[in-house]
Image: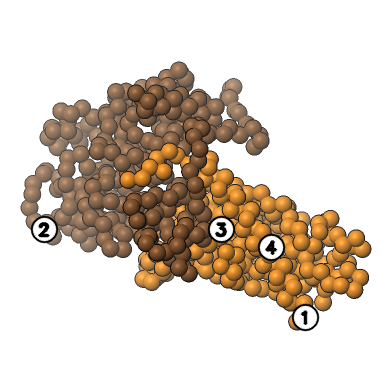
Chain colours: A orange, B brown
Amino acid sequence: MPAADLLSSQGLRLDGRRPNELRRIRCKLGVFTQPDGSAYLEQGNTKVLAAVYGPHQASKSKMSTEAVVVNCQYSMATFSTGERKNRPRGDRKSQEMSMHLRQALTAAIKTEMYPRSQIDIYIEVLQADGGTYCASVNAASLALIDSGIPLRAYVTACSASLGRQSATHEPLVDVSHIEEAADGVCLTVASLPSTGSIALLEMSNRLHMDHFNIVLTRAMQGCRDIEVILDGAVRQHLAEGWTKQDVITI
Amino acid sequence: MVSHVSIKLASERVNHSVASNNDPPRFYTPGEVITGIQDFMRGHGTYAEDDCLKASVAGVMQKVNKLICIRPLKSRYVGEIGDVVVGRVLEVQQKRWKVDTNSRLDSILQLSSVNLPGGELRRRSEEDEQMMRKHLQEGDLISAEVQNVFSDGSLSLHTRSLKYGKLSQGTLIKVFPSLIKRRKNHFHNLPCAVSVIIGNNGYIWISPHKSDILMEGNKDAIENYEIQPVGKSERETMARVKNCILALVASKMMLDDTSIMFAFEESLKYDNVKELLDPEAMLDVAFLTQHRINIIAEE
């Protein structure tokens, strides 16, 4: 059920945002020189680094003759949350995250182009303030673009929750940590906004069937908004790194 | 002991861009519609969906008649026959070596496509197979030429010339393959007594200059030469060339013998080689090099 105190009487959220307002997104492509592609993304106070290696020769046991093998590894830094804690890589939570990341990213990568190869995607959360999955997908999407791997379209992720203001229900986009912790519902969507297809859908907590559609629509709208922001960042990166010989036609 | 340490704030980071101020071209990003599918051919970096031609990578469009390609700023090395590459031996297998050339799949060097030591031409016997590890070991660096590209995109290499083969003393730099200009010649003996192999795959090998007499000389002379220590001044020159290349790469400038030589000449005003690792010095060298290249281009 929607938590009662997620919206103030003025219709503002706990951190002062309006219900349809994303947190500020700042991002940068090509932050490392060693990997084939890399990106850094900040979504509010959630900060994520992504690095892509590949496509390179797959190990014999994993190799597939039809499609490229996508390998994701999600990890959180010891200092990423309020409580300092050593987080081993193979724990259940990060394994689940890695699996979900792989599902979303495989939907975007044109996997059939590169048989017998493998793409490794490493995600490191530097600071977690809710929506780490969304930030990870968005950062990985940028890193893949930076590495020059063919994609069908941008893949972006966004979360949404439901708040109540007097009698009406209002969906909230881009859930932060305090809203997650307030025991509200949290719907996470990873989608390819330009085609409108959904790559992953996940919900925590119970939500009444009547409200599901408005929450989903709000999350999808968030994905489209994020795509616009990422696209702007990619274009700016291209404008900086562009060399004259790129445009010469034969 | 006094040591010089410079720590910079992230906000004071040097912007390495030296690009000339012409208008940027039109950029395409993944999923963007380029044109309707009718009467256009689909090239690299594009795909067809819903009767539209869409981009699958972020970059600029290259159009040859009806063929449309999108070229990304950087990608893995895509080999072409005749390319000069520098690679590292990963594995010794039966009758062939696996070589890492920064391409999508590991490249193959057949035993039958190397020159045997001693230079004799004959069928490869079983003995030769057993001697393979003596010839090239795991971890060895080689220069080679692309002999063939297989249907899955993996490369077959050959070293059937005296200029190719095992690399002994020198340094390797890895850059993005898109920064290498395709040229007739990729082996350069720079006037500063350093030879450079600019591999098409983005691996650059810098080594002390080998005199031509030695190249043609007998096997023992070459082997003796390989194990001799390299003098300090030669090592410094090599380090300078390396730092110059790093400066050009940081500013995303194309690499060939002219640009490397220009950068080297411009860098001579910094007496100490390690000063070239300073971001401001790197930008300065790159900027002056770009300026000289522009002058040549105008002439």
Are marks 4 and 1 in one subunit?
yes
Q: Residue at x 32, y 45 (%)?
A: A250
A198, above or below B90, in the image? below
Residue at mark 2: B125
Under tag 1, what secondary structure?
Answer: helix
Residue A180 x/y as whole percent: 77, 66
Q: Quadrant of residue B212?
A: top left
Residue at mark 3: A141
Which kind of residue does numbered mark 1 sit on?
Asp
- Residues packed near mark 4 inside 10 Å, few (<14), some (14 to 19) or many (20 plus): many
Residue at mark 1: A210
In this image, B157 relative to A92: left or right?
A: left
Residue at mark 4: A222
Are marks 4 and 2 in one subunit?
no
Which kind of residue does numbered mark 2 sit on?
Ser
Of the image marks 4 and 1, the number of the one nearer the N terminus: 1
Which kind of residue does numbered mark 3 sit on?
Ser
